[in-house]
Image (cartoon, grey):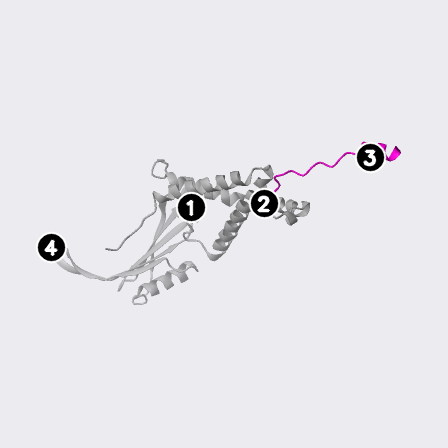
Amino acid sequence: MRDEAIDLGKEKPKARGAGGYLFIPKRLQTSAVILWLRRMHAWTGIYGALFFLCLGLSGFYLNHRAQLKIEGGRMREVASLSMVVEQGVISTEEELAAWVGEKLKITTPPVKARAREGERVAFDGRVADQPKTLEASFRSANALIEASHEVGTNVVRLKRQDASVIKLLTQLHKGAGVNKAYILIVDSIAGALIFMSLSGVLLWTRLHGSRILAVGIMGALVVATMTALSGSWLSWTLP
């Protein structure tokens, strides 16, 4: 009788939920694994929070720049300068880029370097020879420096344009004018997004939804995404 009383006084363990984590193997559904998954999901969110915010704002602007009449997203000229160079030192666009990089301490390669051949032009009723013109441009996320030089002269003309805040964000969004370190950081942010997406789906399934419902929601999302992309996808068929 005493043993029966003890047994009656004990609470029976609660039955495990039928749903569980649908896409996590049963052997991995331990408290340690689930706690690690939750912590990593949270830490990757904190790690990329600032980048997610900037990418979201710039992505929204780029997606609606034709409809939103917001001033910004432009380059504005902030400085111009003429520098003296020894005549004959610069004769090619590569030499111009190297000279400007040395003078202005620019370590990144130029994004554009070209030469425009000279031509004969008419001016005030006279025919004159227009000299060959060399051009080189250096771009970063926040600025653009353009250099030009007419072969045979002793002057290099420089112009600097700075980006507005919106332009800077869109440049970073598109990866224009960034260095290798920034590219590596963005790659890590991309990895964080992928991990957050996967871990978010795994943790979401703890809501004990059915597998059919989970697959249905993901399938509807894929169909909606493909439908949205189909309107902007370009195809080219050769005759």
The residue under label 2 is 41
Which label sits in the foreground, 1 or 4?
1
**Magenta segment:** 1-23
Q: What residue type is labelled 1?
A: Leu
Q: Residues within 10 Å of mark 3 (few under 14, many from 20)?
A: few
Q: Compare marks 3 and 4 and give the one earlier in the sequence.
A: 3
Pick the front one: 124 or 202: 202
List x then y, in percent, for residue 132. 24, 62
User: Which of the two labelled residues, at mark 2 and mark 4, occupies the earlier sequence position?
Assistant: 2
**Residue farthest to the right?**
2
Q: Mark 3 points at which residue?
A: 7
Residue lying at 33% horizontally and 38% vertically, measured from the top left: 66
The residue labelled by disc 4 is 125
Between 44 and 82, the residue placed more toward the observer is 44
How crowded pointer 4 is (Cα within 10 Å; few <14, some 14-19, many 20+) is rated as few
Q: Where is residue 3 in the image (x, y as percent from the top left)?
A: 86, 35
Label 4: state its secondary structure. loop
SS label for mark 3: helix
Question: Which residue type does callout 4 highlight?
Answer: Gly
- Residue 84, image quadrant: bottom left
Q: Which residue is drawn at 65% across and 49% down?
A: 27
Q: Residue 70 bears which disc, if any?
A: none
Q: Which residue is disc 1 drawn over?
A: 168
- Relative image position of residue 63 (x, y in whole percent): 38, 40
User: What's under tag 2, amino acid-wise?
Assistant: His
Whether the residues at callouts 1 and 2 have beta carbons within 8 Å, the answer is no
Task: Tell me which amino acid carries mark 3.
Answer: Asp
Q: Determine whether, in the image, residue 5 is placed left or right of residue 125.
A: right
Q: What element carries label 2?
A: helix
Is residue 72 visible in the rendered image? The answer is: no
Rounded to the nearest whole Å, what is the CA distance between mark 1 and mark 3?
Answer: 71 Å
